[in-house]
Image (cartoon, rainbow, N blue to C red):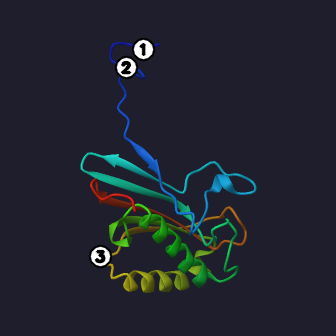
């Protein structure tokens, strides 16, 4: 039931969104042997700019296999590179990232080496200031993953996908 003041399907405003993907770096989760129903990322078109939302990304290869098992530094670097590839597919890079959320399996053991890699990666990319960030200790979706990161970037609307 709708009332005069409640929106109907016809009056709702929806922002245009498109899928973010980069098959050369990593595949879509719904393409896994056991499909997972989420998209690697979305580009949301807003007035004057686009928001790029990268889903939680980890140290997986182009066929969805976990790589660098047991090595937090190597997993962290690969995770940052996977996000970089997704951003590049949208004409963006780490300079456009405004926020990250970093999920670690074991904060007490892994935060220091993770942070070393993050700092080195950001310096290597010439970032200043660094993105806003939150770190959270969690149980990740696979036992062999030690880190997962999601990111949000902002780009002008006229910056097109590659």
Give the CA separation, mark 3 to mark 2: 43 Å
- Res 6 label: 2
- Image location (x, y in percent) of residue 43: 41, 52
How many other residues sit within 10 Å of disc 1, few (<14), some (14-19) or many (≥20)?
few
Taking depth in this image into account, of 49 and 123 the one nearest to the observer is 49
Q: Is residue 125 above or below residue 46?
A: below
- Image location (x, y in percent) of residue 26: 59, 66
Q: What residue is disc 3 on?
A: 129
Q: Earlier in the sequence, mark 3 or mark 2?
A: 2
Q: Earlier in the sequence, mark 3 or mark 1?
A: 1
Judged from this view, the residue extending furthest toward the left is 48
**Tag 3 secondary structure:** loop
- How many numbered circles are shown? 3
Q: Would you identify the image quadrant in which residue 53 lies?
A: bottom left
Q: What residue is disc 1 on?
A: 2
Taking the spot 37% from the left edge, 65% from the top edge, the residue there is: 92
Taking depth in this image into account, of 90 and 80 the one nearest to the observer is 90
- Image location (x, y in percent) of residue 58: 59, 69
Using residue 153 as the reference point, say whether residue 65 is left or right of it. right
Q: Are marks 1 and 2 in contact (CB under 8 Å)?
A: yes
Taking the spot 64% from the left edge, 56% from the top edge, the residue there is: 29
């Amino acid at each position: 039931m709708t009332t005069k003041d409640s929106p109907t399907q016809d009056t709702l405003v929806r922002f245009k969104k498109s899928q973010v993907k980069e098959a050369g770096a990593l595949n879509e989760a719904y393409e896994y042997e056991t499909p997972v129903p989420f998209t690697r990322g979305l580009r949301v078109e807003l007035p004057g700019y686009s928001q790029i939302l990268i889903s939680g990304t980890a140290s997986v290869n182009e066929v969805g296999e976990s790589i660098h098992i047991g090595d937090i530094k190597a997993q962290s670097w690969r995770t940052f590179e996977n996000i970089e590839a997704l951003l590049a597919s949208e004409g963006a890079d780490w300079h456009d990232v405004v926020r990250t959320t970093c999920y670690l399996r074991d904060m007490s053991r892994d935060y220091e080496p993770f942070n070393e890699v993050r700092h080195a990666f950001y310096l290597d990319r010439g970032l200043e200031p660094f993105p806003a960030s939150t770190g959270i200790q969690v149980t990740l979706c696979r036992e062999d993953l030690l880190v997962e990161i999601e990111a949000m970037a902002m780009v002008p609307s006229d910056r097109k996908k590659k």
